[in-house]
Image: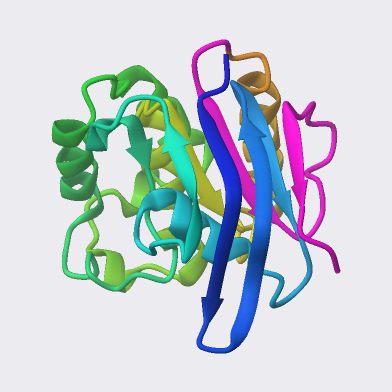
Amino acid sequence: MPIAQIQSLGFGYGKHRIFDKLNATINPGVTLIQGGDGRGKSTLMRLLAGELKPDSGSIDIDGDAPSQLFWIDPRIEAFDQVVASDFFSQQRALYPRFNDAMLARLVTGLDLDSHIHKKLFMLSTGSKRKVFIAAALASGAPVTLLDMPFAAIDKPSKDFLLVQFRLAAGSSDRALVVADYEPPDGVRFAGVVDLGN
């Protein structure tokens, strides 16, 4: 059963149209939103998250509780004064399916152990992104949105993250939606939304 449906979606910034009658189905597993610069990858993520409202059409997500969907814009500065461990505690309180054992594996696998007691503003761009990724994957949210997850992170973390995506591809009750320029290597996708080059 689909976890989310995008139907006849229209959206633009002023006179600049980004989407016109976009249709897509998001099923359990990993869905790729693929496209070049300026093609609307991040915009579509924000529409799915409810940060932006479509001009026309609809986005229907199975279940409407906030805990059904995880989204953090990786460029956000609102958490900069929060210690990483406290950030994880905040997310744990929001998501009833939050998995502490998975979080522990993610913190180690993404090489965050030495950063866990630092405020996020003290972290490099890549490490801050990895904190958000760890929280996203551990949240257990049925729809989890990850915008450019490989940007600015080191190769060992990229390799570890690829393994997590390959495992998530077999999920029957959770959808990871990954926006990127090209498909992550070796990941079996439940669907691809190609926004063009």
Predominant SS along the magenta part: loop
Q: Is residue 4 magenta?
A: no
Across and down, in percent, residue 159 comes to: 71, 40
Tell me where the magenta segment starts and ends, as one range.
172-197
**Color style of the picture:** rainbow
* Vertical side of 1 occupied by 144: above or below: below
Number of marks in the rendered image: 0
Q: Quadrant of the C terminus?
A: bottom right
* Vertical side of 135 occupied by 19: above or below: below
Name the one closer to the observer, 129 or 190. Answer: 190
Q: Is residue 194 magenta?
A: yes
Can residue 83 be seen in the rendering of this structure? Answer: yes
Name the one closer to the observer, 59 or 95. Answer: 59
Residue 74 location, quadrant: bottom left
Across and down, in percent, residue 166 comes to: 71, 25
Name the residue at 59% across, 21% down: 28
In the orientation shown, which residue stands out farthest toward the bottom?
Answer: 15
* Vertical side of 14 occupied by 105: above or below: above
Residue 50 location, quadrant: bottom left
Name the residue at 74% across, 33% down: 191
Can residue 137 be seen in the rendering of this structure? Answer: no
Apparent side of residue 167 relative to residue 173 in the rendered image (left or right): right
Across and down, in percent, residue 76 comes to: 34, 70
Name the residue at 55% across, 76% down: 12
Q: Quadrant of the N terminus?
A: top right
* Vertical side of 136 occupied by 97: above or below: above
Across and down, in percent, residue 138 comes to: 38, 30
Name the one closer to the observer, 168 or 156. Answer: 168
